[in-house]
Structures are given as structure tokens and as C-alpha cells.
Image: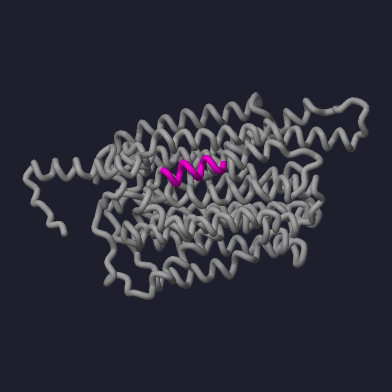
Amino acid sequence: MSEKPDQPLTAVAEPPPTAEARPGGRDGIVLAIIATAYLMIGLDATVVNIALPKIQAALGFTPVGLSWIINSYTLAFGGLLLLGGRLGDVLGRRRVLVSGTVLFTLASFIGGFSNSPGMLLGARIGQGVGAALLAPNTLALIAGNFAEGAPRNKALAVYSATAGAGSSVGLILGGVLTDWVSWRAVMFVNVPLGLFVALGAPRFIKEPERHQARIDYAGTVTVTAGMVSLVYAFIRVPTDGWSNGLTIACFVAAAVLLIAFVAIETRVRQPIVPLRLFKNRSRSGGYANILLLTAAMLSLFFFLSQFVQDSLKLSPANAGLAFLPMTVGMFATVSQVPKLLPKYGGKPLMVIGSALMTGAMLWLTQLSSSSGYWSSVFGPLLIFGVGMGLSFMPLNVTILAGVPREDSGSASGLVQTSMQLGGSLGLAVLVTVFGTAQKNAAGRPAGASPVVQAQHAFTHALQSAFSVAVVFVGLALVVALLVFKSKKAVAAAMARAAGVGGAAGAQPQKTG
């Protein structure tokens, strides 16, 4: 099934789910199950971070090995995302979501009992594989269970809030659990959530109609190997640099494999990633913006969590709570977006959201060793959260609008892939900028004590990293201004389409 390159964003590719297909009263349960499934992934992106020092002390990780607690998860998750989305299209999205949830929950349970570095890393890989099966099918199941328009917009508002807030909630929860219970609790917290999803999904979530299809094996192998090579290359950059031989080899291998993948996808009848998804200009812009905004968001979590603990001397629990303004700002905003979207369209919301996030990042470039939480951190976090609330839900609506049902898993998988690549790319670039700036600032100011010099080097590096992050969100603002269509443009496109249809002999529809 194909679509026109600039199909209006309100087009419906297939008949929407009917009320009879899912009786009233179940919508809330369906949304709770899907949102909980995605919450586990958002939590896991950051809940482990604040617990890393405790894990290192308990299991004897080396400093290099400790980074692989994060990297092993990212590598498995980012490398297999597109395959997870396509498996949902072919085997059934609900079935693949439940399978991924079971694997994710089991791996979390095993990880909580880990008594060696190898056991914990194996559990993290299992979580990554489970997340790759689970994540793309959450968004696809919203498309398959909620009719396009107001019902889907309300569902996407909750989903977007959950997706964005999960990471900041993870920091809060990770700090509290590590301080008050144990580092093992950050793994066990996924178990009750996973059981709720695994038991509730088969009962309440409607399985969208499956389409007869074959697995694109050549495309699957090349894109999976290419994505793993690309993510692994970005993972190596912060520690080994851009000029490292193996890092360069991984980038080259990724480029060759992904070029081969695109060539394959143009020739096969049932591709793992239908390239027609990119013919819609606004959808392509949506993918680009999700990549850019996620690069800035995850980098903000990474650097600010260090600043509030190292410079402001907050405990892990208080460091997590320091991110609460972002969560509150986003939830407060995203609850209003379904009311604003029909009235103003997505473009103004995404422009304002990107502008607010750019302003928040500019504010963070002023951090110094004398900065306080209320004067220099609270405000940017609150503004950034409001910007996220305005941006992510309209982006999801834009990407899903008009996608044929048989391609919804692939379209959703590309959303998650954009987020993972954005996070990996953003951290790789900004950690490299941070490290270089910190080395250049070493020994300054001359004659100062080593403690003062270390503080100066740290804050100078932080300012440099956030300055580059401004570029990420600034580019997202440019895309929002130049690529996305205004509400009037969408309405005009719909009018032209109606006129063409009438000229071709289509039966006019009654209005009134």
C-alpha cells in the first residue's frame, strides 16, 4: 500500500478501529497497559545511572567495565529495534510486545540477583533485546487501537508524556531506591510493571489485523549489523576518540552495510523498512526532530546529574528529585496539547516547544562553580520540560498520520531508532567535547588551588557541552520552522485532493 509524498497529515489510510471492536471502558485500560510497557523502557534508560557507583562497589566492576552496564543495553536495543518493529508487522504486534515484555521482565529479575559483572551484563543485554521487541510495538498498538483524530491524539498525549517523563522519573526513582533500599531494587522495579503488561495485554489489547508478509532477511541482516556497528562506534568515541582505528572501522562498516540496506530495500517487495515512509516531508522532518531533541535531552540528563552531585553536593535521592521540575512541566503541558492541536495545528506547538528547549539550553551554558540549584538549574529544567510537552506528542501524531496499518510497526520502530541514535550520537559528541574542553582548561586559573582548578575545568567543560547541545535543539527549531506544514497548508492540500477527486468522478460527500 503506497502513499503520496505530501499526503495531508489528517489522512486515514485504513478504516479506524470502531467502538464495537473495543467496548467502551476498555480504552483507559488499553492505554494504561501500553503506557506502562513504554514506561519500563523510559525508566531503564536512566534508573541505573545513579546506582552505578553502588554497583561498582558491590560487584567489582572496573571503570571501563562499568560503562558497559549502559552500553550493553544500548547496543542490543538500538541494533535490533527495526527488526522488532517488522516482526510486529508480520507476527502480530501484541504477540511481539508480550514476548518482549516477558524477556525484559525475566532479564530484570535475573539482573537483580546478579553476583558478578558478567551476570549483570548478560541481564542488561537481555533487557535490550526485550526492549527492542517491545518499544516499536507500543506506538504501533496505539495506532491500531485508537481511531485517528481526537481518540488517538489523547492516547498519544499520555504516551508522549510517559515516554518523555520516564527518563526523568528514572533518575528520581533510581536515586531514592539506591539510597533507601539497594541498587538491586532498580532492577526489580521492572518486575511488577512487566507482569501487569504481560498479563493484561492479551486480555484487553486488540490485535490489529496482520498482513501476509515475509521477513526481509537480507534487509534484516544488513540493517541490524549496520545499526549495531553504528551504535558501537558511537559508544567507543567518548573513551577511544574519533580517530581510533576500531572506531573508524565500525563507522566504515556501518556506512557500507546501511548503504547496502537502502539498495536492498529499493528492490524487495516487502522491505523491513518501507522507504515510502520518507516520501512524506513532514514525517521525515519528524524523525529528524526526534533524533535531535533526544540527543539534547539525554545529554542534559547525563551532565546535569553529575553537576548536581559533584558541584551542588546533592545525595543520589536529592539528585534524582532535582529533575522533578522537568517532569512536572512536561506533564502539565502535555495534558493541554490535545486541546491545542486541533485548534492551532502541530507546527506552532513544535516551533514554540523547540524554541523553549533552545532557550533552556542557552541558560545552562551559564553554569559555573558558583551556580545554585534555584538560580541556575530549576528554571532551565522547568522550561525544557514544557518544551518537551509541546513537541513530542505533535511529532508522534505527525509521524503516524496516514501510515498504512501494515507499515505502522516499521514507522514506530523508526521513531525508537531515531531516539536511540540521537541519544548515542548526542552523548558521543558531547562527551568528546566535554573531555577536550576539560583537558584544555586544566591548570587554570594559574596559581589557584587544585580544587578550584578542578571545579573551573569541570564547569568550563560543562558550558562547552551545553553550547553544542544548543546547536542540536536549534537545528530542531529550524526543521520545525521550515519543514512542517502549517494548519492552513494542510487544509489547502485536503481541499486540492477533494477537488481532484471530484474532477475524477468521485461522488461528492454531503456536508452540513
Residue 374 visible in the snapshot: yes
**In x, y percent, where is residue 263?**
36, 31
Which residue is at the front of the view, 65 or 410?
A: 410
| In this view, 123 is above or below 260 | below
Picture residue at 35% right of the left edge, 39% below the top: 485
Residue 150 is situated, as x and y percent measured from the top left of the image, at 35, 60
In the rendering, at what x and y percent does residue 190 appear? 60, 64
Using the image as rendered, state which of residue 196 and residue 125 is in the foreground. 196
Left or right, residue 9 beside residue 333: left
> Looking at the image, which residue sits at the far left?
505
Instruction: In the rendered view, tell whether residue 370 sits above or below residue 98.
Output: above
Q: Is residue 242 above or below residue 136?
A: above
Q: Is residue 12 left or right of residue 162?
A: left
Q: Residue at x 44, y 66 (%)?
A: 31
Q: Nearer the viewer, residue 138 or 498?
A: 498
Residue 327 shown left or right of residue 223 in the figure: right
Q: Is residue 124 visible?
A: no
Q: Which residues are magenta?
A: 348-357
Residue drawn at x 81%, y 54% is 57
The number of numbered badges drawn on the structure is 0
* Residue 97 painted magenta: no
Q: Is residue 300 above or below residue 326?
A: above
Quarter placement of the C terminus: bottom left
Q: Residue at x 68, y 30 (%)?
A: 433
Instruction: Using the rendered view, name the quadrant where residue 320 is placed.
Output: bottom right
